[in-house]
Image (tube, rainbow, N blue to C red):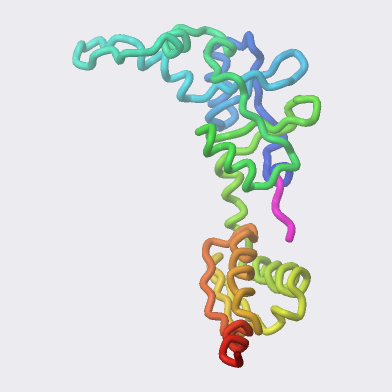
Amino acid sequence: MHHRTVEELMTRDVVRARCDTPFKEIVKLLADNGVTAVPVVDELDRPMGVVSEADLLRKSSAQADPSGLTPVPHLEAWERAKAEGARAEELMSAPAVCARPEWTVVEAARLMAVQNVKRLPVVDETDRLQGIVSRGDLLRIFLRRDDAIRDEITGDLLRGTLGPVASDVTVEVREGHVSLGGSVKVRSLIPVIERLCRSVDGVVSVAQHIAHRPDDSQNSAKDS
C-alpha cells in the first residue's frame, strides 16, 4: 500500500513572516494571500513559530468596549503580552510545531490532534521551511475516487499482500465506504483483512460479510 505523504499534500509556496514583521504587515499578508496563518522564520528560513488570525485578534479582544457594555476579558500574562505585541516574534505561538515531508497523513494528523494545532510547517533535515500542511490538506485523501481505492485494496492488499488466501474476497466501494464479501478458508483472516482495508487512504468505513469455513480447531476438538 502507498500511504500519501505530507510532501504530496503540502503547499510548497509558503507565505511567511520574519521575526521583525510588524502587526499591520502580517494582517496584510493574510488578507492578500487568502490564508489564516503564516509561519515566522529566522534568517536561515527556520520556523520559529506561527502567527494566526486568533493571535492577532487578541489585540482587538483586549481593548475596552467604547459602549461599556462588554467587560474586558481577563487575560493571562502570556495573553496580555500577545495583545500588546507589535511584531511577529511577540505575536506568534511558539515554538513552531513542525512536520517532515516523509511523514504519512496519519503521523501528521496525530501530531495536530495532540498539539491542538490546525497546520504544520514542513521542514527538511536542516529544519528549513519546505512547505506547510493544514487540516484541509490532510482531508484531501478522502477525495480519492472509489475505483482507485478499490484497485488498491484488490491489487496491493488482497493480491499483493495476502495472496491466494484472500483470492475469493470481493470488494465494493461507494463514496469511500468499503463492503467486503466472498469467502476465506480461515476465520481468523477476516479481522486482518478488515484492519488492512481501514488503513487504506481515503477509506471512510469498512463493512464485511465474508463467509468462512469452520475453524480447524473446532473440527479437531470434535474428532478427539
Identify the residue at horizontal 73%, vertical 27% (top origin). 129
- Outermost residue on the left side: it is 69
Residue 2 lies in the magenta-colored region: yes
Give the magenta-colored segment's residue range.
1-5
Q: Position of residue 176 (x, y in %)?
A: 56, 65
Q: Tell me the quarter of the picture where residue 162 sits.
A: bottom right
Does the magenta stretch mainly form a helix, a strand or a loop?
loop
| Closest to the observer, 139 or 63 | 139
Above or below, comparing residue 193 to residue 60 in the picture: below
Q: Percent position (x, y) of residue 107? A: 64, 43
At x 54% / y 10%, what residue is drawn? 90
Quadrant in which residue 3 is drawn: bottom right
Residue at 45% across, 24% down: 54
Q: Left of 7 or right of it: where is 93?
A: left
How many marks do you count on the picture?
A: 0
In the rendered image, residue 61 lying in the magenta stretch gets the answer no
User: Is residue 58 or residue 81 the one in the foreground?
Assistant: 81
Q: Quadrant of the C terminus?
A: bottom right
- Whether 222 is drawn above or below 96: the answer is below
Q: 22 and 214: which one is in front?
A: 214
- Taking the image as shown, residue 1 lies to the left or right of residue 105, namely right
Give the residue displayed 36% in from the left and 13% down from the top: 75
Residue 87 place in picture, x, y as percent = 56, 9
Q: Position of residue 184 (x, y in %)?
A: 64, 82
What quarter of the picture does the N terminus occupy?
Answer: bottom right
User: Who is closer to the viewer here, 224 or 20?
Assistant: 224
